[in-house]
Amino acid sequence: MNSLFDTKNNLSILRKTNGKLPSLPFVRIKNDILGKKYDLSVVFPNILEATKLHIEWKKKNSPVNILSFPLSKTEGEIIISLSQARTEAKKYDRSYIEHLTCLFIHGCAHLKGHVHGHTMDVFEKKFQKKFLDFS
């Protein structure tokens, strides 16, 4: 397990699987979408935990790709399964890091109050263009 606690940027990241934390511009994305004062926790669970969470929150018996939990107007948590992100990346013809970035942007969009649909898609595309080359 490894973790990052960036109190200056109100961001904590916890990886509950083996390996290094993915190299993404977490702070820049968080600050651009949610603001510098927003307190965000990001958790990368193991596959068993990701499956339990998906059963609990979505009634689906498979690992969740992402869940977002707004805790208040200025605080939230995002849970992303790295193994699911790796598997799904191929489906979307993206690299693992590109897809992980899209998932993180998606989670932040939910914490910002967006729900699935055209408006959220347009919102996400704006940030995908900023943080990725393929958009």
Image: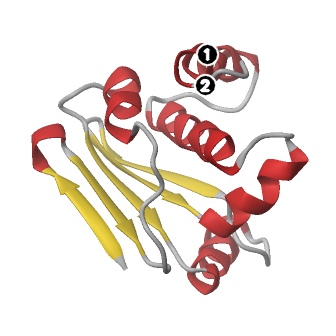
Q: Amino acid at mark 2?
A: Leu
Say above or below: 117 vs 74: above
- Residue drawn at x 64%, y 80% is 47
In this picture, residue 54 sits left or right of residue 12: right
Q: What scheme was used to colour the molecule?
A: secondary structure
Say above or below: 120 vs 2: above
* Label 1: element kind: helix
Task: Report crowding for label 1: few under 14, some 14 to 19, many 20 or more residues within 10 A (C-alpha).
Answer: few
Find the distance from the CA under tag 2 to the CA under tag 1. 5 Å
Q: How many marks?
A: 2
* Label 2: element kind: loop
Outermost left residue: 8
- Residue drawn at x 11%, y 48% is 7
User: Badges 2 and 1: C-beta atoms under 8 Å apart?
Assistant: yes
Q: Return the x and y of residue 8 as percentages of the image width and height.
A: 10, 41
Q: Return the x and y of residue 116 as percentages of the image width and height.
A: 71, 32
The N terminus: image quadrant: bottom left
The C terminus: image quadrant: top right
Q: Amino acid at mark 1?
A: Lys
- Which residue bears the numbered disc 2? 132
- Which residue bears the numbered disc 1? 129
In this picture, residue 117 sits left or right of residue 68: right
- Residue drawn at x 59%, y 13% is 126
Say above or below: 26 vs 67: above
- Residue drawn at x 44%, y 78% is 16
Say above or below: 131 vs 16: above
Q: Return the x and y of residue 53 as percentages of the image width and height.
A: 59, 74
Outermost bottom residue: 48
In this picture, residue 60 sits left or right of residue 100: right
Quadrant in the rendering for residue 43: bottom left
In this rendered view, identify the residue nearer to me: 124 or 112: 124
